Amino acid sequence: MFLFFAFLFFFVGVAAILFLPLLWGREIHHRYSAPRAVTCPETHQQVGVTIDAVHAAVTGLRGAPEFRLSDCTRWPARIKCGQECLPEALRNEPYTQGEVHIPRSRRPIYHLPVLLAAFAAWYVGMVWHSRYLFRDRWMADLGLTMAQWRQMIAWYSPHLLSIAACLLFAYGVAWLQTWLSSRGIWKGILSSTLLWAALLLATLPSLLGLSRDLLLIEAGYTLIATIVVGAIIGGLTGRLVLLPEAK
């Protein structure tokens, strides 16, 4: 009984110690997460910015929070700006949708992250279907012999179709992120997973004829490739680009 109460007091004490900093971090995040209207020091026009509330909340647990911008309506074209508008953003109150007119710059699709993501997805598929992982089970489910497998590898069409599918999916994820005006690793994974789920539902009738093992193998590969594509595009969009020089 004594050990039970000792463990209970210890658990309550640890929970109390962790609860107060988490409550403070939640308050910081809630205070600075909404977008704010500021005057851009470069163009002297009104723009919308978002403070990195997660970074502020995490650093606030160690003392004074550190502030930086996580988004701006002029990004990613001007993502390397000096963020001189940050003090004004900290002073201003958040705005609601439609309260102020914020002209948004066009967010193009940057091709380099898309190409890297497509190559990564194709490479994951090559490893996934190699002899080190699921090649033998994949061949058995399709009824392929080793001679047929080698002949298939020698053809160009399967490789081209695989590369084309990876490219189309990667560009689809990039378009979805541009349409949603979102970026970041987790948002990229979310966008790619949503697209993967939509494609899975669309092709479900044709997948019902596959064997259980083959379906699991292909579902596992496409899901892992989906996460990789989303992480690369979400994490590198607006960063791994050649940006114009500031005038």
Image (cartoon, rainbow, N blue to C red):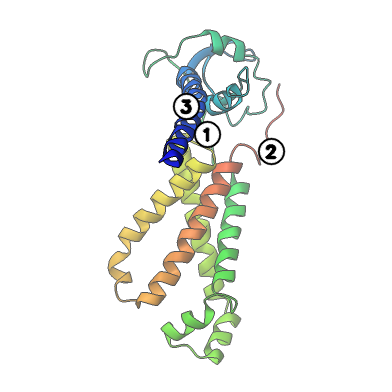
Q: Are marks 2 and 3 in contact (CB under 8 Å)?
A: no
Q: Are marks 1 and 2 in contact (CB under 8 Å)?
A: no
Q: Secondary structure at mark 2?
A: loop
Q: Is residue 72 among the parts visible in the rendering?
A: no
Q: Nearer the viewer, residue 17 or 101?
A: 17
Q: Residues within 10 Å of mark 2 (few under 14, many from 20)?
A: few
Q: Indicate the quadrant containing the C terminus: top left, top right, bottom left or bottom right.
A: top right
Q: Of discs 3 and 1, which sits in the foreground? A: 3
Residue matched to label 2 = 242
Residue at the spot 46% in from the left edge and 19% down from the top edge? 27
**Upstream in sequence: badge 3 or badge 1:** 3
Q: Nearer the viewer, residue 240 or 31?
A: 31
**Upstream in sequence: badge 1 or badge 2:** 1
Q: Secondary structure at mark 1?
A: loop
Q: Is residue 8 among the parts visible in the rendering?
A: yes
Q: Indicate the quadrant containing the N terminus: top left, top right, bottom left or bottom right.
A: top left
Could you tell me residue 202's position as x and y percent? 31, 60
Residue at the spot 63% in from the left edge and 29% down from the top edge? 79
Numbered mark located on residue 213 in the image: none
CA gap, disc 1 and disc 2: 14 Å
Numbered mark located on residue 107 in the image: 1
Numbered mark located on residue 16 in the image: 3
Q: Quadrant of residue 9?
A: top left
CA gap, disc 2 and disc 3: 48 Å
Q: Nearer the viewer, residue 184 or 107?
A: 184
Q: Secondary structure at mark 3?
A: helix
Q: Of discs 2 and 3, which sits in the foreground? A: 3
Q: Residues within 10 Å of mark 3 (few under 14, many from 20)?
A: few
